[in-house]
């Protein structure tokens, strides 16, 4: 192996890595702005999510844990049908299942 041989660089992979690094720093900056301006859904006492340390929370309670916003939708009184909207992975199915269980166990 010749020490003076040119090094082959995969240019597309290099620029993809550079773009990913730049996007990561932009997202970190945006996240800092959201948290410092108390906007969005930032948790004020992170990593204690509203009094629960999320890293030490028992697994058997995690499977039934709802975010306070989700719990408010589950236990709210509606005058007819309700529409819950959101993007994929936001917990709509979880809220619907908890709502059905709550309605089944709560007297009218």
Image (tube, grey):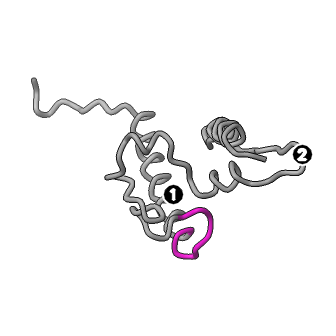
Q: Is residue 55 above or below residue 12?
A: below
Residue 85: % across, % down: 76, 44
Q: Mark 2 vs mark 1: which is more N-terminal?
A: 1
Q: Residue at x 56, y 53 (%)?
A: 67
Establish if 22 lies above or below 90: below
**Relative image position of residue 56 (x, y in whole percent):** 31, 52
Which stretch is magenta?
A: 34-42
Q: Say which residue appears at 64% left-offset and 57% top-offset.
A: 69
Q: Residues within 10 Å of mark 2 (few under 14, many from 20)?
A: few
**Outermost residue toward the right in this view:** 80
Residue 7 in the image: x percent, y percent?
24, 33
| Residue of label 1 | 27
Name the secondary structure under disc 2: loop
Depth check: give the residue in front, 107 or 43.
107
Residue under the point 43% across and 45% down: 61
Label 2 and label 1: CA atoms lie apart by 40 Å
Query: Which residue is denoted by mark 2 in the rendering?
Result: 80
């Amino acid at each position: 192996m010749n020490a003076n041989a040119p090094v082959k660089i995969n240019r597309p992979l290099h620029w993809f890595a550079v773009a990913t690094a730049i996007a990561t720093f932009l997202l970190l900056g945006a996240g800092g702005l959201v948290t410092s301006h108390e906007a969005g859904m930032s948790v004020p006492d992170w990593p204690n999510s509203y009094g629960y340390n999320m890293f030490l929370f028992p697994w058997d309670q995690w499977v039934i844990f709802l975010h306070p916003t989700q719990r408010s939708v589950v236990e709210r009184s509606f005058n007819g049908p309700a529409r819950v909207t959101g993007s994929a992975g936001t917990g709509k199915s979880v809220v619907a299942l908890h709502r059905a269980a709550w309605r089944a166990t709560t007297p009218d």
